[in-house]
Amino acid sequence: MDVHVVEHPLAAARLTVMRDERSDSVVFRAALHELTTLLVYEATRDIDAERFEIRTPVAATTGVRLANPPLLVPVLRAGLGMADAAHRLLPEATMGFVGLARDEETHEPRAYMESLPEDLTGRRVVVLDPMVATGGSLLRCCEMIAERGCTDISVVCVLAAPEGIRKLEESGLPLTVTTASVDEGLNEAAYIVPGLGDAGDRQFGHY
Ligand code: PRP
Ligand code: URA
């Protein structure tokens, strides 16, 4: 499985804002939006494009357009904060939704929503979730997508723990991961260390 850690000062600066406990939800959401733009840009470098002929006001030339626009899948709740930035870069994309909540005791994901096209054969799917901690939520989401025939899943996250990366790797699913950082590991509550806390709560509040 290919894991691409985006190393760029602009990405690192947004990530720092997100990590900083003094950043309120307005600042946190803005940094997540901007960082998502940088991460999706990197994650789609190899996306299918086709050439076609156009004319500038001066001469004929060859242009480029997406050949097979992907499906974007933000994982609710926290992935919602990445959806708009990704959709702006890929306006031709369609969007599906998966809702997953991690049980606070067992850390197992509970699926509460699944809104995906029936057939994903031949489609690229870009999954958006800021956090890959144990990897359980992402794995569940990617299984739903692979069951629909997808063989090309790009996971875009802000932070990943080595434990989560390992779980995704061991799944054998057709995945690549693009992230701003692979952090040290997980604490006893399965939070990423140093991490940034609870990405859903920091955007939308704790309830
Ligand atoms: C967070 C995060 C991931 C998951 C990561 O969501 O957005 O989906 O936890 O943890 P894992 O890798 O151990 O499964 P959470 O379940 O807190 O729900 P939320 O987005 O609604 O806050
Ligand atoms: N979910 C989060 O939002 N943060 C973590 O550190 C782990 C899971």
Image: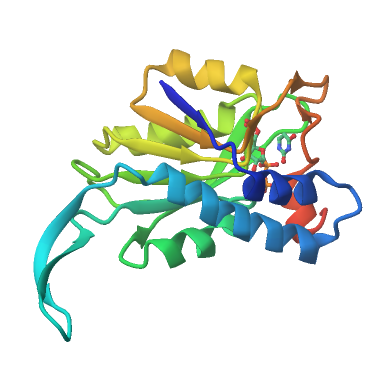
Q: Position of residue 182 (x, y in %)?
A: 64, 27
- Front residue of 64/167: it is 64
Q: Is residue 197 left or right of residue 110?
A: right
Which quarter of the rendered picture does the N terminus lie within? top left
Q: Position of residue 83 (x, y in %)?
A: 52, 59
The answer to whether residue 174 is above or below residue 200 is: above
Q: Residue furthest front?
A: 58
Point 28% across, 46% down: residue: 47
Nearer the observer, 42 or 164? 42
Residue at 49% across / 22% down in the picture? 168
Question: In percent of the image, x 36 and y 67: which residue is there?
Answer: 91
Judge whether residue 124 can be spotted in this image: yes
Q: Residue at x 30, y 66 (%)?
A: 92
Give coordinates of residue 23: x percent, y percent: 85, 56
The answer to which quarter of the image holds residue 64 is bottom left
Position of 49 relative to 143 (above/below): below
The front one of 34 and 80 is: 34
State the image quarter where residue 120 is shown: top left
Name the foreground residue: 136 vs 163.
163
Q: Position of residue 125 (x, y in %)?
A: 35, 45
Residue farthest to the bottom?
A: 57
**Splitting the image into four quadrants, where does ligand 2 fall?**
top right
Image vertical order of residue 26 relative to residue 59, above or below: above
Task: Answer with left or right where residue 11 lies relative to residue 149.
Answer: right
Using the rendered image of the protein, determine whether residue 114 is visible from the camera's viewpoint. Answer: no
Q: On the rendered image, what quadrant is the C terminus found in?
A: bottom right
The colouring scheme, among rainbow, by chain, secondary structure or one colour, is rainbow
56 sits left or right of 87 in the view: left
